[in-house]
Amino acid sequence: MFTLSSHHQFNLFSQAIDMRKGFNGLSGIVTNILQDNPRSGEVFIFINKGRDKIKLLQWQGCGFVLHYKRLEQGTFELPHYENLEGSIILSYTKMAMMVDGLSIKNIAERKRFNALNSTVTA
């Protein structure tokens, strides 16, 4: 099953890439530039210079899955980030909004319970 969910971590590569790159080229960027493991289960997002093409590279147990979208009109809106960073982490919501063409600039995230940050008192 080819699925993306909120259980994944989404890493947006901060530089434009050549969209002719496939599985090997993109996993090479993850390994050599980001110093990360492309088989970690995280989803790595790549966008071209014209911001009208996007690829998502994901490892699913026994092989890579490549999601590819080309816009016929318009561009993908990117979140603000420093160009020097290797990648930025996006939430599932921001990734889905970006891919669907919704504005992500004025998102106000409301406070939610996080089991990792909560303390249990006896």
Image (spheres, rainbow, N blue to C red):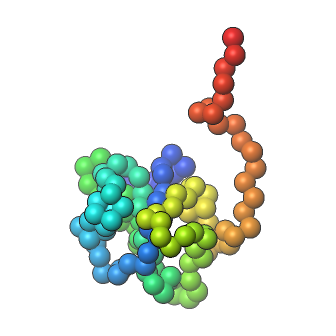
Q: Residue shown at 55%/49% (left/top)?
A: 6
- Above or below for 75 versus 5: below
In the image, is residue 11 above or below residue 14?
A: above
Please tell me how many numbered marks the rendered image carries.
Answer: 0
> Is 65 on the left or on the right of 87, as rendered?
left
Which residue occupies 69% across, 11% down? 122
Q: Is residue 75 among what the camera can see?
A: yes
Q: x%, y% of residue 5?
A: 51, 51
Q: Is 79 placed left or right of 57 in the picture?
A: right
In the image, residue 36 sits, relative to residue 28, either above or below, namely above
Q: Nearer the viewer, residue 53 or 16?
A: 16
**Quarter of the view holding residue 92:** bottom right
Q: Mark yes or no: residue 23 visible.
A: no
Please report the residue visible at 42 percent of the width from the left and 71 percent of the height from the top.
46
Q: Position of residue 65 (x, y in %)?
A: 33, 60
Image side of residue 34 versus residue 85, left or right? left
Residue placed most toward the observer, 97 or 33: 33
- Looking at the image, which residue sits at the far front? 84
Can you tell which quarter of the image residue 79 is in? bottom right
**Place of residue 3 in the rendered image (x, y in percent of width and height, measured from the top left):** 45, 54
Residue 22 x/y as whole percent:
28, 72
Q: Residue furthest top?
A: 122
Q: Residue at 25%, 49% (x, y): give it.
A: 62
Q: Nearer the viewer, residue 49 or 57?
A: 49
